[in-house]
Image (spheres, helix red, strand yellow):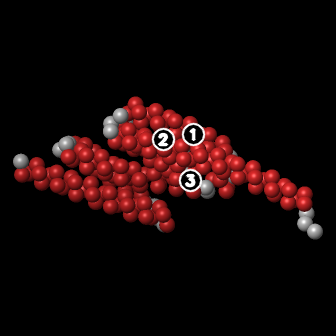
Amino acid sequence: MLDQTALSAVVRSYKAMTVRRRELQQLSSDILSASKRAIFAVQRGMKGDADRELKEARSLVMRGKKVVGTDRRLLSEGAWRAALEEFAESAMYRDAMFASMIKVPKEIADDPDVVIGALSDVTGECTRSCVLAATRRDRVEVERLSEIVRGGVAFLLELDLTGSLRQKFDQAKQNLRKVEEIAFSLSLSRAIE
């Protein structure tokens, strides 16, 4: 005979976690969406719009953290991890373009994997911005963005990354190669002028 009391507790716990998981998945989707809108606003130079989207995403992250609590199963939920990384990327990219220093968002500072993944992705956003600066022949901006990418890669080089973080690091190194090529091409065009 099965212990019905214990099984009833399992059913209650499972159902409660399922409700929280669904709520977290919806919040994660909303965080991802707001973060992507913030990145798009930064790309267009619209600081006010980016700040509004980041404020919304930050609020949703805080709500999500309450849903997760200390439940390890929810902490490792894929959609949640992706949303946190996108949020961190958007906040760091905003800083790269509008502030004097890139800061790690305090909401994710306790999660090294999210920070490392986001920093790796920021190098890609800075590379895209570098391409746009080069099309305007803005050498100062190309050099500034190149330094950010170079600094990100230098930091990541200090770590012994494996798995998906290693793949992100490899992408960051490719981004560095791209910005160096952009800077080189720009210098050649100046020499020809």
The residue drawn where x is 41% and y is 61% is 169
The image quadrant of residue 98 is: top left
Judging by the rendered image, the residue that carries numbered circle 1 is 60
The residue drawn where x is 43% and y is 41% is 37
Single out the residue that lies furthest toward the right. Answer: 1
The local crowd at label 1, few if under 14, some if 14 to 19, many if 20 or more residues have their Cα within 10 Å, is many
x then y, percent, for residue 91: 45, 42
Judging by the rendered image, the residue that carries numbered circle 3 is 79
Judging by the rendered image, the residue that carries numbered circle 2 is 34
For the residues labelled 3 and 2, the Cα–Cα distance comes to 14 Å
In this rendering, would 35 be left or right of 182? right
Q: Is residue 31 visible?
A: yes
Single out the residue that lies furthest toward the left. Answer: 193
The residue drawn where x is 63% and y is 53% is 75
* Type of amino acid at the residue the image marks with label 1: Leu
Q: Earlier in the sequence, mark 3 or mark 1?
A: 1
x then y, percent, for residue 150: 32, 54
Q: Earlier in the sequence, mark 3 or mark 2?
A: 2
* Type of amino acid at the residue the image marks with label 2: Ala
Q: Earlier in the sequence, mark 2 or mark 1?
A: 2
User: Do callouts 3 and 1 mark residues in contact (Cβ within 8 Å)?
Assistant: no
For the residues labelled 2 and 1, the Cα–Cα distance comes to 9 Å
User: Do callouts 2 and 1 mark residues in contact (Cβ within 8 Å)?
Assistant: yes
